[in-house]
Amino acid sequence: MVIVKETAAVKGTDLSNADEIVGVFKRVLIGPADGAPTFAVRLFTLSPGGHTPAHTHPFEHGVVVLRGRGTVLTTAGLVPIQAGSVVFVPPGDYHQFRCAGSEPLEFLCVIPVQYET
């Protein structure tokens, strides 16, 4: 069955904690609850100055930047991203997303569905 949702209607979670994660809001647009067998699509919104944790994980993910400006921290350094940028993070690669602008950084992130918790 085809599922259609409005992103604004999807409830999200503030992932922010004291140090590792600052100003990060996540909405699972398509995921396990929808019966998706292969992938999950998440919408992340990072507030100005916000960032995800610097981390690695055993799965790949693809990112499409929808709005704002930011950087991706990699082992090679900081890489600028903006609306229209596409990012591929291979399994095991160190990374962190940061909002670098005065407006929120918003991006879609697609991962294997079994890793969406």
Image (spheres, helix red, strand yellow):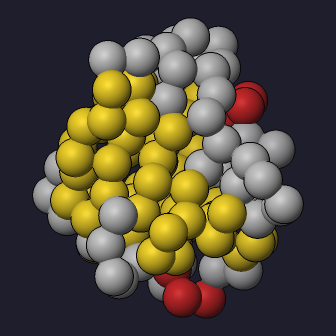
Instruction: Please state the horizontal and vertical placement of residue 52, each as a whole percent of the image.
Output: 60, 50
Q: Quadrant of residue 78?
A: top left
- Residue at the location (31% across, 72% down)? 101
Residue 105 vertical position relative to residue 5 in the rendered view, above or below: above
Number of marks in picture = 0
Q: Is residue 62 left or right of residue 50?
A: left
Which residue ends up furthest to the left in the rendered image?
A: 84
The answer to whether residue 65 of the structure is visible from this angle is yes
Residue drawn 64% across the image and 80% down it: 10
Q: Position of residue 114 (x, y in %)?
A: 73, 29
Q: Would residue 79 be found to the left or right of residue 5 on screen?
A: left
Q: Depth check: 80 or 109 in front?
A: 80
Of 108 and 105, the residue lying toward us:
105
Q: Is residue 66 visible?
A: no
Residue 96 is left or right of residue 64, and the answer is right
Residue 5: give x, y in percent of width and height: 52, 78
| Residue 51 occupies quadrant | bottom right
Question: Vertically, is 29 above or below 56?
Answer: below
For the N terminus, give its image quadrant: bottom right
Residue 30, above or below 25: above
In the picture, measured across the screen, residue 56 lies left or right of residue 6, that is: right
Task: Name the residue at 33% across, 82% down.
Answer: 102
Q: What residue is drawn where x is 83% and y is 61%? A: 17
Q: Residue 57's image quarter?
A: top right
For this orientation, the residue located farthest to the bottom is 9
Residue toward you, 64 or 96: 96
Quadrant of image for the C terminus? top right
